[in-house]
Image (tube, grey):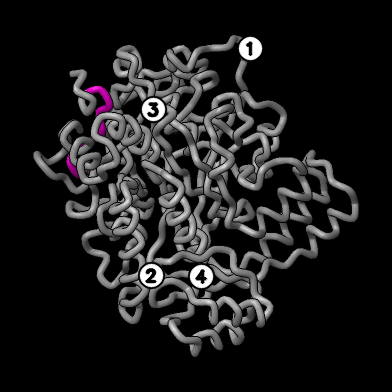
Amino acid sequence: MSLQLAVSKSGAVGALAALLIAGTGVGSPAQAQVDLMNFEPSPQHLVMTRGAPNRQLLTAIEGAGGEVVFQHDLGIVFVRGLSDEAAANLSVVRGVTDVQADEWFAGDTSIESEALASSQVFSPDDPAAAFFYPRQWHLQAISAEPAWAAGRTGSSDVTVAILDTGIDYEHLDLQGRVDLSRSVSFVGIDDFFTENLFPGRALIADLHFHGTHVAATAVSNGIVAAGVTSKPTLMGVKVCTFTDFSCSFAAVISGILHAVDNGADVVNLSLGGGFPKAGNGRFVGFINKVYNYARSNGATMVVAAGNAATDLDRNGNIFASYCDAPGVICVSATGPTDADSVNGPWTNVDAPAVYTNFGRSSITVAAPGGNTGGRVWAACSTTSLLISVCRTSPTFVVGVFGTSMATPHVSGLAALVVEDVGRRPGRVKSAIQQGADDLGQRGTDKFYGKGRINVSRTLGLE
């Protein structure tokens, strides 16, 4: 999904709380409902430092009444609870190079939902037997099934971090796949709602549905719907809020560093946005430093190209987050233009999606993201506050389209390639490019990059 700059969360929180009180099927005591309506999210800031944050800075933050949400020796402190004025005062502390108010990047999505109509239990060893697999044109398009038949269903030793709205680890397709000990939430708004409405659930519980869908597209038990793989380990890193599907920049940067430092082999970012390069050179330099850190520590970064149907090669003064970052795999979207039914046959399965961003020097590869003739189908969260039917059973899927959906197809494939080449992001990227089906203009195409991914060919099975 392509994300654009957003503003305050407070209006969305109030509207959502009013909706809850009106009745959405989520049980909560009356006092908790009042608290939800009155909840005001704390201001957030990103403090950048020269080297590791020093004790003087941390003491200054504490003394001003702020909370250190995350800090890293690369030179970052994610601070919550300070006014703009109090945060600006930190700029005089020794070692501080910049203080920025946090930005939120917001997006939209389109959904369909449908219930599982069978109680039969299938095996992760045979994802093609998943109940909804017949309508998953997107996995058929990338030749995933021959890889499954050859026993390439992934390894639990490989970890895929999903930076998103969280993951529903209770959904049938995701049970046992998520390592909660390494999962974390950086979204205070969601933490508050989770604790009040779903007590006992881990803070990475997905109150939206986006992160669950993304995670299950990359890795799924293959009971309700199949994923590209079925056995890698997932790490949930919540950086986006359910209230309006927006993502905190400070949370994203913190989430990347957390994922890398906790052993993620692949990091999926189905989110994005952009900001002017002019006047933000230090900021761009810091982003590049974070991504270079990830790459040098063995993490393959897979990011969405975005849904604005624009040429990323001609975006002028805009730094595209995060296709402009170094070493990433930037993914555009493909999908059918028509279908006879939800189970196909489908027409022009590899057509560039009408919404996808493009650019010959920007796009690495393409993957199925959905189009006018079909959506991508995967798990829906049982804690979703947006799709109430999904809360009734861990057997629901949703159909969604966007470059957000294309990206985890590549992350699932990257997890398989890591098994073969190890934690070498450059080699992982090259293998995926070399194994892709060359579509559009021969060589590098503005919509397909080096081509639409092919799982079996990349793994040497064709």
Relative height, residue 394 to residue 2 (above, below): above
Q: Position of residue 317 (x, y in %)?
A: 28, 72
| Marked residue nearer the N-terminal end (4 or 1) | 4
Which circle's residue, 1 or 3, is located before the other in the chain? 1
Q: Amino acid at mark 4?
A: Val
Residue 281 at what x, y percent from top left? 31, 77
Q: Is residue 151 visible?
A: yes
Label 3 – label 4 distance at C-alpha: 36 Å
Which numbered marker is on residue 297?
none
Residues packed near mark 1 inside 10 Å, few (<14), some (14 to 19) or many (20 plus) = few
Residue drawn at x 41%, y 56% as measured from the top left: 272
Label 3 or label 4, whichever lies nearer to me, is 4
* Residue marked by disc 3: 228
N-terminal of the pair, mark 1 or mark 2, is 1
User: Is 394 placed left or right of 268 in the picture?
Assistant: right
Which amino acid is tagged 1? Answer: Ser
Image point 26% across, 33% down: which residue?
453
Left or right of 408 in this view: 288: left
Disc 3 and disc 4 in contact, CB within 8 angstroms: no
State the residue position of label 2: 275
Image depth: mark 4 or mark 1 in front: 4
Q: Which residues are magenta?
A: 449-456
Q: CA distance from mark 4 to mark 1?
A: 48 Å
Q: Quadrant of residue 56?
A: bottom right
| Residue in the picture at 66% in, 81% down | 63
Amino acid at circle 2:
Phe
